């Protein structure tokens, strides 16, 4: 079974061997911890990969390395939008790993075609029998056209539907959609610098059985600028935390409503560090308060 010590040993070896060869895990190596998608028997690994700059740049080799890293540690979730959808689809098919990925695919945002047409086009690109998750950032449009998204599920094109945004002003409309039973997933910003979703949205999602994906764990780098030059507290070792990146990720993952936290790095070394945040112990409520105060004191 993979534990924190095994992962750190793996990560140390990895630093000396990039670019990576294909890595296959054995049956006795479950990799990242998983959490159930509410209302289902399906499990989702707790750390995923956001819409990386490597995807947006069309960097196929860098994309391959990132996907290989995620899969090698038992991860699966990858967020893709725009042209990134085709970059990841191409690399995943070339690697033969498309069925091992859980892709959060943004659809119907160009205005040039219907959601169903876009979903069919993405199915062809990904080489999957059904899209895992259809996402949109157009929350008002989703509210007006929620029936069309439900038809994607009814027609066997999509397994789950959801909305994604990264500012507090969208929390209320997201909660309205959750109350209406219109979404299976919500992707929202939540961190020690942006803890507002923890007040109402995350508890509501837990009560209503809506899966939660977290974006902006590092607030576009603002978090690292705040902690730069400061030593990681020694007590972080009490919850198996080895870096400031993991400090943020473990705070987020310690909220019981969170299914998966997404990091958007294009740097394999950072990806290794981020994946490490999913292993080991998590802080309890008392420790979470201490973490939050530590970050506030550094502001």
Image: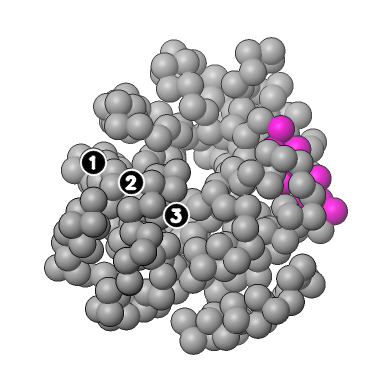
Q: Which mark is residue 190?
A: 2
Q: Secondary structure at mark 2?
A: loop
Q: Is residue 150 visible?
A: no
Distance Cα–Cα, label 2 vs label 1: 7 Å
The crowd level at tag 1 (other Cα within 10 Å; few <14, some 14-19, many 20+) is: some
Q: Residues within 10 Å of mark 2 (few under 14, many from 20)?
A: many
> In the picture shown, does residue 240 fall above or below 287?
below
Q: Residue at x 30, y 26 (%)?
A: 169
Q: Is residue 202 left or right of residue 114?
A: left
On residue 234, which mark appears?
none
Residue 277 lies within the magenta run: no
Q: Nearer the viewer, residue 266 or 40?
A: 266
Task: Give the residue at mark 1.
Answer: 196
Q: Which secondary structure, mark 1?
A: helix
**Which one is closest to the eye, mark 1 or mark 3?**
1
Real-space Cα separation, disc 1 to disc 3, in angstroms = 18 Å
The reply to whether dot 2 and dot 1 touch (C-beta < 8 Å) is: yes
Q: Secondary structure at mark 3?
A: strand
- Measured Cα–Cα span from mark 3 to mark 2: 12 Å
Query: Can you identify the residue that label 3 sits on?
Result: 260
Ranked by sequence position, the earlier of labels 1 and 3 is 1
Q: Position of residue 156 (x, y in %)?
A: 64, 35
Q: Residue at x 69, y 43 (%)?
A: 55
Segment colored magenta: 83-94
Seen from the viewer's position, the closer of residues 76 and 294 is: 294
Please indicate whether residue 67 sits to the left or right of residue 7 in the image.
right
User: In the rendered structure, which disc, 2 or 1, sits on the residue that comes first in sequence?
Assistant: 2
């Amino acid at each position: 079974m993979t534990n924190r010590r095994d992962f750190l040993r793996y990560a140390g070896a990895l630093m000396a061997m990039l670019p990576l060869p294909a890595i296959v895990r054995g049956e006795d190596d479950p990799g990242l911890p998983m959490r159930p998608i509410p209302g289902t028997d399906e499990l989702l690994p707790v750390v995923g990969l956001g819409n990386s700059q490597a995807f947006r740049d069309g960097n196929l080799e860098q994309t391959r390395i990132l996907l290989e890293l995620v899969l090698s540690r038992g991860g699966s979730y990858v967020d893709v939008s725009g042209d990134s959808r085709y970059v990841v689809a191409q690399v995943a098919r070339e690697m033969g790993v498309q069925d091992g990925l859980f892709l959060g695919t943004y659809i119907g945002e160009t205005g040039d075609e219907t959601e169903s047409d876009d979903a069919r086009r993405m199915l062809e690109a990904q080489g999957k029998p059904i899209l895992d998750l259809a996402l949109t950032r157009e929350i008002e449009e989703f509210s007006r056209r929620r029936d069309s998204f439900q038809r994607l599920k009814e027609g066997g094109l999509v397994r789950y539907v959801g909305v994604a945004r990264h500012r507090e002003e969208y929390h209320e409309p997201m909660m309205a959609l959750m109350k209406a039973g219109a979404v299976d997933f919500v992707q929202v910003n939540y961190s020690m610098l942006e803890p507002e979703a923890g007040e109402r949205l995350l508890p509501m999602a837990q009560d209503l059985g809506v899966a939660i994906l977290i974006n902006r764990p590092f607030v576009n780098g603002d978090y690292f600028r705040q902690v730069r030059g400061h030593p990681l507290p020694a007590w972080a070792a009490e919850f198996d935390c080895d870096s400031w990146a993991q400090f943020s990720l473990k705070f987020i993952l310690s909220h019981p409503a969170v299914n998966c936290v997404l990091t958007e790095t294009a740097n394999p070394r950072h990806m290794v560090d981020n994946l490490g945040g999913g292993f080991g112990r998590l802080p309890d409520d008392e420790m979470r308060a201490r973490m939050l105060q530590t970050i506030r004191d550094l502001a």
